Amino acid sequence: MTKSAEASAEQERWDQMGVRRLEDIRDNPAKYIIKDSPLSHRPQNDDFVKSLGDLKDKTVLDLGCGLGGMAVFLAQRGAKVTGLDIGPALIEAATMIATTNKVDCKFQVGNITELSFASDSFDLVVGTAILHHLSEPDLIKAVQEVHRVLHVGGTAVFSEPVENSRAFDFIQNLIPIKGRERYRPSILQRKAWKQHLATLDDRPVTTQELVRAGKPFKSVRVRAYGFLMRFSRFLPPKSGLRKKLKNLDNTLFRVLPPLRQFCQSALVEYHK
């Protein structure tokens, strides 16, 4: 499959999310009222929100906006938000959700490696779990584009799943996981694992890779989250142990910094 064909297939896969949601948004708009950060269930949420600062009248670009939850959250806090994603149906769904929440957001179809915006267009760029869907060359292109469209003094903030240890990755992949929408077999189930890999449109990204990609920026800051939190997937959704694991992770990373190598997610700030 050519790179062009792969890109088209990826666009179609993601756009189907929008197609599936459009009718539900029309029929059940109350389900799509945004009251909190879309990352509120993640350990990095508090730091993510703090890193955004005062959003009043700031121009913000939300890359990989999906259904627009983050864009709406930012607009509710006074930002002038533009959301970008690769699927027309996703953009239509995001527009409907913004209207449902009575906020003014602009959404458009586009590729984050080739942004159509003029240089120095935004005060802030954000992205949640988007960079790990890119190849390493495309990740570098995307971050370079982010640097181009940011004002001098602007900031880009990305929340990304990461995997720094191949050994740790192998160990956790020994255990099959049954999620809401996707089953991940054990790596020992060779045929099933091969089929699973063929369905993926993401890859393990390291914190070192995120730092290297930020070379054009004046400074890069990376914060690590989730070591014991990895095991929260085996706990009930509303288990009080989740918060305890999060707090314990924070303590472990502070007392034993080398454990950050085994973090589950990272918050990266690029400062221009």
Image (cartoon, rainbow, N blue to C red):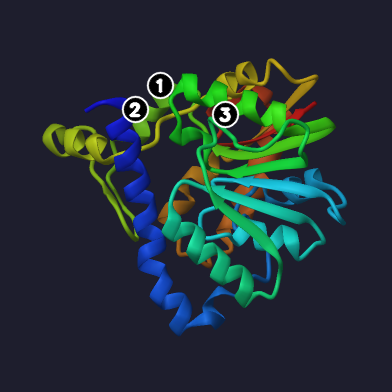
Q: Secondary structure at mark 2?
A: helix
Position of 162 with respect to 6 (left or right) is right
In the image, residue 118 above or below residue 67: above
Does the rendering let one see residue 40?
Answer: no
Residue drawn 68% across and 51% down? 45
Q: Marks 3/1: CA distance?
A: 25 Å
**Residue under pointer 1:** 166
Q: Earlier in the sequence, mark 3 or mark 2?
A: 3
Question: Where residue 204 is drawn, which disc sits there?
Answer: none
Dot 2, how many residues are within 10 Å of its Cα: few (below 14), some (14-19), or many (20+)? few
Inspect the image, locate mark 1, and give the three-letter code of the amino acid beneath it. Answer: Arg
Q: Quadrant of residue 106?
A: bottom right
Residue beneath disc 2: 170
Position above or below: 250 against 41: above
Q: Which residue is mark 3?
A: 142
The N terminus: image quadrant:
top left
